């Protein structure tokens, strides 16, 4: 039997985009998956859209938080808690996958040794309206803990990890929570491997462009000093590399 993949999708007021996100999962060539959508108290029509899909396909499940958390951490963790699959993947409700995403990544897992606990892919930036223009964010062929300290190369919408190797891994209540989560897996000595293909479409939202650029810098410093405890000298070294990579990525 093929391994089940649990796809975790946090959702908050995503009525304009969630249908496309779900349809991109339905279009996957690999079909043994469950989609767990966790609504964080949306006030728009997001939930009604999702319920239509739940009625049509038993692989799609809707959960709801008791109160709005204001970040994707709580709904993601709720999704991980209820996940039944060996593999856990993430897709935000305003992004999309390309049809071969799961199939390509599971092939890398099957073709790799036991050191590989994470598989990820390159992705394409698209406009808020969904227009594509070839803005490809390419990542290295592989990553380990040491290389990831120089900056996050795993787009969260592309990452997938193997619970048979690392168990269920939850997000910390911290900014840049996806980066910290991937680091926690790699810190155990595991590797992450890239499929070398473009597997997802990342929607660049206008509401998040300016404020997050500045915030990300402070979040990253906090991770180095207070989470990974690299010490100040190493933190400065990694921070400089991270800032340069971040500038390059923003220009794509």
Image (cartoon, rainbow, N blue to C red):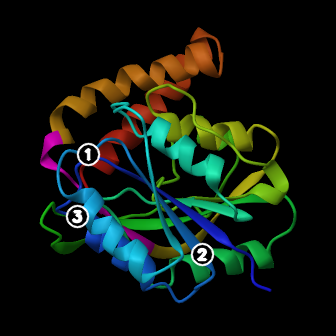
- What is the distance, in whole Å, between disc 3 and disc 2 at their CAs? 21 Å
Residue lying furthest top in this view? 232
The quarter of the picture where the C terminus appears is bottom left
Q: How many marks?
A: 3
Using the image, tell me which numbered label, if any, was put on residue 181. none
Residue hosting label 2: 33
Residue at (19, 73) in percent of width and height: 133
Image quadrant assignment for residue 204: bottom left
Bounds of the magenta span? 199-207
* Secondary-structure class at tag 2: strand
Which residue is more in the foreground, 158 or 87? 87
Q: Residues within 10 Å of mark 2 (few under 14, many from 20)?
A: many
Mark 2 against mark 1, which lies toward the viewer?
A: 1
Front disc: 1 or 3: 1
Q: Is 225 above or below relative to 178? A: above
Instruction: Work out whether 175 lies above or below 4.
Output: above
Residue 239: image location, x then y, percent: 47, 25
Whether residue 205 appears in magenta in the rendering, the answer is yes
Q: Tags 2 and 1 in contact by the CB under 8 Å rule?
A: no
The residue tagged 1 is 42
Give the mark nearest the N terminus, 3 or 2: 3
């Amino acid at each position: 039997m093929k391994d089940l993949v649990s796809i975790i999708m946090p959702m908050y007021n995503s009525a304009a985009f969630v249908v496309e996100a779900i349809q991109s999962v339905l279009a996957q060539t690999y079909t043994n998956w469950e989609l767990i959508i966790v609504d964080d108290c949306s006030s728009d029509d997001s939930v009604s859209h999702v319920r239509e899909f739940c009625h049509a396909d038993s692989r799609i499940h809707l959960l709801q938080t008791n109160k709005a958390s204001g970040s994707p951490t709580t709904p993601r963790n709720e999704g991980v808690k209820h996940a039944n699959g060996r593999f856990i993947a993430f897709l935000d409700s305003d992004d999309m996958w390309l049809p071969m995403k799961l199939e390509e990544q599971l092939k890398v897992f099957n073709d790799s040794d036991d050191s590989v606990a994470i598989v990820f892919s390159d992705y394409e930036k698209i406009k808020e309206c969904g227009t594509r223009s070839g803005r490809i964010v390419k990542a290295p062929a592989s990553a380990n803990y040491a290389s990831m300290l120089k900056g996050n190369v795993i787009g969260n919408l592309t990452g997938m990890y193997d619970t048979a190797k690392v168990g269920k891994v939850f997000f910390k209540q911290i900014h840049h929570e996806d980066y910290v989560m991937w680091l926690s897996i790699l810190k155990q000595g595991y590797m992450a491997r890239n499929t070398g293909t473009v597997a997802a479409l990342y929607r660049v939202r206008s509401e998040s462009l300016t404020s997050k650029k500045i915030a990300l810098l402070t979040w990253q410093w906090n991770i180095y000093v207070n989470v990974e405890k690299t010490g100040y000298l190493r933190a400065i070294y990694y921070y400089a590399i991270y800032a340069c990579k971040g500038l390059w990525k923003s220009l794509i």
